[in-house]
Image (cartoon, rainbow, N blue to C red):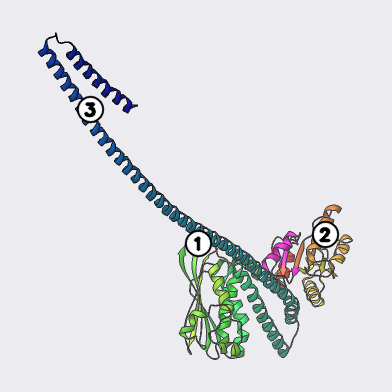
Amino acid sequence: MVACKKILLDYGLLVILVLTLLRVLLNPHAQEIYTYALAIASCGLILAVFYVQHETNKTAIAHALDLEHVAHDLAQSHVTIAEELAQANVVIAKDLKSKSDAKQKISDRDRETAEDAMQSAEKGRASAEVATLVAEKANKAKSDFLANMSHEIRTPMNAIIGLTNILLTTKLDGKQKEFVNVLQTSADGLMVLINDLLDIDKIESEIIELEQTPFSMISLLERVISVMSVRAQEKGIKLNVHYEAGLYKTFIGDSARISQIVLNLVGNAVKFTDEGAVSIFFANGGQGNGKRNVTISVTDTGIGIPENKISEIFGKFVQADSSITRRYGGTGLGLAISQSLAGHMGGTITVTSSEGIGSTFVLSLSLPVEASESDSPHLENIIYLDKASNIKKRPILLVEDYEANILVATILLENLGYRYEVVRNGLKAIETFAHGKYSAILLDVQMPLMDGHETARRIRELEQTAGLSRVPIIAMTAHALKDDREKCMASGMDDYISKPFNPRQLQAVLAKYSGIEKPILAA
């Protein structure tokens, strides 16, 4: 369109110029000079216009060519850039894909690792659960074994110790009394071993319970001396006891556990001393707040302990030398138990020793003292005995299946003045109870046909349905673990005596349920 307009303009100007020249030539009468000049000027103008247009066209063509070249170059550049960008995009896409693949691999590996970790954790948790179950099963098996062994050993031991105590109350010649004393010492030693095994189980299970009752420390030490004097005499060594002047005598605490510790320390001193003496020194100092610092030292002239073994002797089943077990016997439990018991009471046991010279063990405790001391006898020295009153009471129903223990219990009841009836299993006990009236029931726990727990429950049900008054039921059993007492109480029993028991324990528990307000001293 632009080219057509340009051609029409150029030819139009040319036509105008030609027409102007013709007019001049055809009109000779006009002013020639003016006309001629006008024609010349017109021609020059036309020529100038032609020239300008021509140059303009050249320039425009040149610019158009330049623009065309530029456009071509730009197009080439765009193509090159586009190709480079495409190549770069391909490289970037490959790189991104490579990274994406790497991330995917890492993600897959992490997922596999996480899955493996979860599987390992599951296996570990399962193994831990199995190990826990195995440990619990083993612990239960151990506790069941100890409980069963305790029961099986305590049952005949009750007969041995009971008959030994009964024999000592009869008329014996010197030799017979000596034999019975040896029998009693041996039985006591066996019971110490049984109690040590049970105490280890209790300590490991953290079920040690401490009593807080008044007791005489002097009486406690004298009983220890009495028990150990026979063994000391047999070995030909002296057994001495010394008391600090002005000391307190009556304290509040667990006398049985303190006695157990002191008996163990003195027993070890006597065991490991072949000549010389064993000395016990009791002292207490001020502390305030109603308490006193109590120390009981046990010194011997025995074999002593090597310095490098002193730190080991309080371990379970450990003795300073393996040859000691062969020569002196023992399990290596006593010191471990004693230290644990002292720790439970807030005390300590320390030791100093020289090999071949001797050892000193010191028990340190902080014990409350009784508010006022008097010369009245302590509870453990009181014997509940009033035969005239006891024989008037209703009979006691003894439920026991072991003949030797029946013999021991019936002799003790006769000596105390009680009337009694004997049955040998729980079913017979319920039948007998339903047709009689009794002041108390001494009930064994492990029996054929029906155990003591079920028997006690049935008797309580019978009392409720028949409107009978409650009769005291006292468990008299060789089951001596902590839970055994609780089980007896839960089944409806009123009290508990563990076998083997001594006459004083039986006297005390029967008097407790006989309505005696004040204890009666033995004459």
In the picture, the disc for residue 458 is: 2
Magenta stretch: give its range.
476-496
* Residue carrying label 1: 290
Q: Please, is residue 487 above or below residue 194 in the view? A: above
**Measured from the top left, where is residue 58 in percent x and y?**
23, 33
The picture quadrant where one finds residue 440 is: bottom right
For residue 393, side relative to residue 485 (left or right): right
Please tell me whether mark 3 or mark 2 is closer to you in this view: 3
Helix, strand or loop at disc 2? helix
- Is 419 on the left-hand or right-hand side of 114? right
Query: Residue 507 lies in what quarter of the image?
Result: bottom right
Q: In what quadrant of the picture does the N terminus appear?
A: top left
Give whichever of 166, 426 is nearer the camera. Answer: 426
Callout 3 touching callout 1 (CB < 8 Å): no
Amino acid under disc 3:
Gln
Query: Residue 400 lies in what quarter of the image?
Result: bottom right
Residue 169 point in image, percent of width and height: 74, 80
Identity of the amino acid at label 2?
A: Arg
For label 3, count other residues whose C-alpha is less than 10 Å away and answer few (under 14), some (14-19) or many (20+): some
Q: Is residue 121 left or right of residue 440?
A: left
Q: Is residue 443 visible?
A: yes
Residue sitting nearer the eye, 155 or 287: 155
SS for tag 3?
A: helix
Residue 53 disc label: 3
Residue 312 belongs to magenta span: no
- Alpha-carbon distance for marks 3 and 1? 134 Å
Q: Position of residue 476 (x, y in %)?
A: 75, 69
- Which residue is pictured at 72% across the width and 68% down the height? 497
Q: Nearer the viewer, mark 1 or mark 2?
A: 2
Q: Name the image quarter holding the C terminus.
A: bottom right
Give the x, y percent position of residue 188.
Answer: 67, 80
